[in-house]
Image: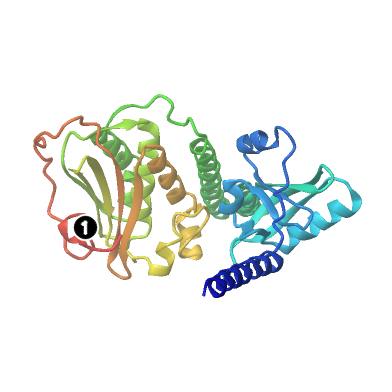
């Protein structure tokens, strides 16, 4: 019995030893992780570029968080074949390779990112990949290029008209009526050209980061009064009544002249795109720490598809009507930038055939809640067009 027991124990030990040796034989050999040259990890930690270090088999040894955020690394491999091709070329030639690339933002969809990639051998086996995201700079460059192209086109129209009108005046020098007619046309084109140049200057100034580097308290009542006064002649020509109402005494921090420009553009647009003998209302409300300045008209309204683009530079809902009214396509873009520079926003609510309401919202300068001052009396508005009020706030902006 003792001999049998000993034999059983020996057999069990032999089986365990055999299974252990088989597991060791079948298990993949663990390759030691390649060591980075001294100081490389510290340098990668402070780089603004997305960085990836690859081993001799192009497996990822180390990758910075930015590399994962840009989608350059998935699992233990580079995600983009363009980068893998640069790595192979750098290994083959033993040289640094640099290239601008357009890469897919992710495995799905068509979104792209624009990057500047540099690949360099790092020691005998490792390769370093550095990628700088230039998507934003590319977008800004495209905007600047489009802006210059649009400016060239917009300037060419009135300048060409002035040249033709000048020739017409010269040819009609013996006809006083024709000279007066062409001279009036020249004056209109000159005014349009002057307005365009001034709005380009205003927009350029607004795009400077420190356009409001010394904001001051601005009384909204004064802004509205000056803006309405500047468009009074245009309103009289079309017999459009401009009424002002709402809360009195609102104050915001910012630039008085820029705010007058923004409100004037809104009121001027409301007059230009309204039929004759209608009404435009300017309403000021203070609520929730904000000053809301709404400009409502009883005009033609704006289609939903156009509402998404009307704040783009040079975008016109109706180019023919805009040119007839002398519009430059920059007014609402200026309003958007003024609102942004004052920590606010501008939104639009509109129904085709009924009218539109543009609302400029800015932080109230009041440091604590207090009762509103007495409201300024305003004439009752007709119900034909939209108004800034409780009903309007429920409408999608």
- Residue at image x 11%, y 33%? 370
Task: Name the colour scheme.
Answer: rainbow
**Can residue 166 be seen in the rendering of this structure?**
no
Q: Is residue 355 above or below residue 313?
A: below
Instruction: Please indicate, yes or no, whether residue 113 appears anywhere in the rendered image.
Output: yes
Residue 372: quadrant of the picture: top left
Q: Is residue 94 left or right of residue 105?
A: right
Mark 1 element type: helix
Q: Position of residue 386 (x, y in %)?
A: 23, 61
Residue at image location 41% in from the left, 38% down from the top: 341
- The residue at 69%/57% (across/down) is 30
- From the viewer's side, name the closer residue of 65 and 229: 65
Q: Position of residue 118 (x, y in %)?
A: 76, 47
Instruction: Answer left or right for 82 relative to 207.
Output: right
Q: Is residue 42 above or below residue 183?
A: above
Residue 110 is situated, as x and y percent measured from the top left of the image, at: 60, 68
Q: Which residue occupies the foreground of this view, 17 or 97? A: 17
Residue located farthest toward the right when viewing the structure as drawn: 93
Q: State left or right for residue 258 relative to residue 350.
A: right
Q: Nearer the viewer, residue 329 or 9?
A: 9
- Of 32 and 103, which appears nearest the observer? 32
Dividing the picture into quadrants, the one containing residue 168 is bottom right
Q: Position of residue 178 (x, y in %)?
A: 57, 55
Left or right of 137? Residue 90 is right
Q: Which quadrant: the C terminus?
A: bottom left
Q: Which residue is mark 1?
A: 393
Q: Residues within 10 Å of mark 1 (few under 14, many from 20)?
A: few
Q: How many marks?
A: 1
């Amino acid at each position: 019995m003792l001999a049998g027991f000993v034999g059983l124990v020996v057999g069990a030990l032999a089986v365990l030893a055999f299974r252990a040796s088989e597991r060791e034989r079948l298990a993949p050999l663990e390759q030691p992780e390649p060591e980075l040259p001294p100081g490389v990890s510290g340098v990668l930690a402070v780089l603004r570029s997305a960085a990836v270090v690859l081993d001799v088999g192009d497996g990822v040894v180390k990758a910075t968080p930015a590399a994962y955020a840009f989608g350059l690394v998935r699992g233990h491999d580079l995600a983009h074949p363009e980068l893998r091709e640069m790595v192979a070329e750098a290994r083959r030639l033993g040289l640094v390779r640099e290239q601008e690339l357009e890469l897919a933002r992710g495995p799905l969809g068509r979104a792209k990112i624009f990057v500047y990639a540099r690949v360099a051998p790092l020691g005998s086996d490792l390769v370093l990949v550095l990628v700088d995201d230039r998507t934003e700079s590319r977008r800004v460059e495209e905007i600047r290029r489009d802006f210059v192209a649009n400016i060239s086109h917009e300037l060419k129209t009135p300048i060409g008209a002035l040249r033709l009108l000048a020739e017409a005046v010269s040819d009609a020098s013996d006809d006083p009526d024709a000279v007066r007619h062409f001279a009036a046309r020249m004056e209109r084109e000159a005014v349009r050209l002057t307005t365009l140049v001034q709005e380009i200057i205003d927009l350029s100034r607004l795009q400077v980061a420190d356009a409001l580097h010394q904001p001051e308290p601005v009384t909204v009542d004064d802004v509205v009064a000056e803006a309405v006064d500047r468009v009074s002649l245009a309103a009289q020509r079309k017999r459009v009544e401009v009424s002002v109402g709402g809360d009195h005494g609102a104050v915001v921090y910012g630039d008085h002249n820029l705010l007058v420009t923004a409100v004037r553009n809104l009121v001027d647009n409301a007059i230009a795109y309204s039929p004759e003998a209608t009404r435009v209302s300017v309403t000021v409300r203070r609520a929730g720490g904000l000053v809301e300045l709404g400009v409502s008209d009883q005009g033609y309204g704006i289609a939903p598809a156009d509402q998404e683009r009307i704040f783009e530079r040079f975008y016109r809902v109706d180019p023919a009507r805009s040119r007839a009214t002398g519009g430059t396509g920059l007014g609402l873009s200026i309003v958007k930038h003024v609102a942004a520079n004052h920590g606010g926003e501008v939104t639009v609510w509109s129904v085709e055939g009924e009218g539109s309401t543009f609302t400029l919202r800015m932080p109230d300068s009041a440091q604590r809640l207090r009762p509103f001052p007495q409201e300024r009396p305003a004439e009752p508005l007709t119900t034909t067009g939209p108004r800034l009020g409780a009903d309007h706030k429920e409408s999608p902006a």
